[in-house]
Amino acid sequence: MPGERRARSVTRADVARYAGVSTAVVSYVLNDGPKPVAPLTRERVLDAVRVLGYRPNAAARALSMGSADMFGLLVHDNRNPFFAELCHALDKASADQGRSLLIVNSDRDQADPGEQIRELAARQVDALLIATVLTAGEQALVASLNIPTVMIGQFGETEGLAGVGVDFCRGAREVVEHLIGHGYQDIAFVGSAARYDERERGWSEALSAARLPLGPLIHTPFTYQGGYEAGVRLANAERMPRGVLAASDQIAIGMLTALHEHGVRVPEDIAVASFDGTVPADFVWPRLTTAVQPLAEMAETAIAALVNPDPERRFHELTTRLRVRESCGCTSASGS
């Protein structure tokens, strides 16, 4: 339609002519600076924008200002329930600061995280959020870009970069202590062998502190399929442990399916607990007892660290919360 065509073709110069001001004044009004504009002039410019249907070109604005009002997020796999919920929380926290969020998955076929980081930088993002494991070389690349960066969900501080995460060891220890409190003495751990896992350390420390032997240790991918395969191994074991801590809800849910298929009752035959506290953990049966990561607080803390960095505090460590459900042997009344 002619009206639509006219609205799409309106330029900043058209707005300036209509309002009787320079294009620089239009820019000051739309970008809220850097120079002040008199209230009446500002109203004339905004009225011209409304009448003409002007829509600023975000790409051109980014080029002219050297900023895209956007944060870049490199995440391992946003299909994973934990990362999906983290992305949602970060998107909300970014929007609260007037920024958009550009999400890139590092698990894509033939994806090179280093190249993905360079691509995000080339898009003139204001800052980077990294929610995946980087090599030493990739960490050095991030540091060399001189872009505000926060690492999320790492097992402690990454040298030279700000970070936000939880105390994985303490959270896992609290879950295992809860299982021990039920009287379970043979407790397994299922997690990833990709790198040392602080959750595995928490499991080990809790059992050692209770003077109990370490139960079976199974390494498997952080996927539903990985959890399913671990569940099959547990069900077919010569001696099945009485309890198990899964390093993620996703692993635990896959385990529940395998155990059910093999006629193993949860929690009557084996108690299951997990880590993360994602939404699906409350919509399986039995519902999962889990260490909840405070995703909203993590996201708000990460964005605040980008917007107002504190050089005196490079790493922000948050605490998990034990959410008790039926999979450990507690009744629904004891859940929280």
Image (cartoon, rainbow, N blue to C red):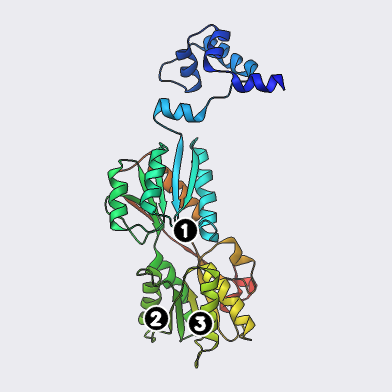
Label 1's element?
loop
Quadrant in the rendering for residue 268: bottom right
Q: Is residue 194 left or right of residue 252?
A: left
Residue 35 visible (yes or no): yes
Q: CA distance from mark 2 to mark 1?
A: 40 Å
Q: Amino acid at mark 1?
A: Asp
Q: Nearer the viewer, mark 2 or mark 1?
A: 1
Q: Are marks 2 and 1 in contact (CB under 8 Å)?
A: no
Could you say which is closer to the camera, residue 79 or residue 89? Answer: 79
Query: Which image quarter is the C terminus in?
Result: bottom right
Q: Are marks 3 and 2 in contact (CB under 8 Å)?
A: no
Residue at 41% from the left image edge and 26% from the top image edge: 65
Q: Choose the circle earlier in sequence order: 1 or 3.
A: 1
Q: Choose the circle earlier in sequence order: 3 or 2.
A: 2
Q: Choose the circle earlier in sequence order: 2 or 1.
A: 1
Per the image, the residue denoted by label 3 is 243
Label 3's element?
strand
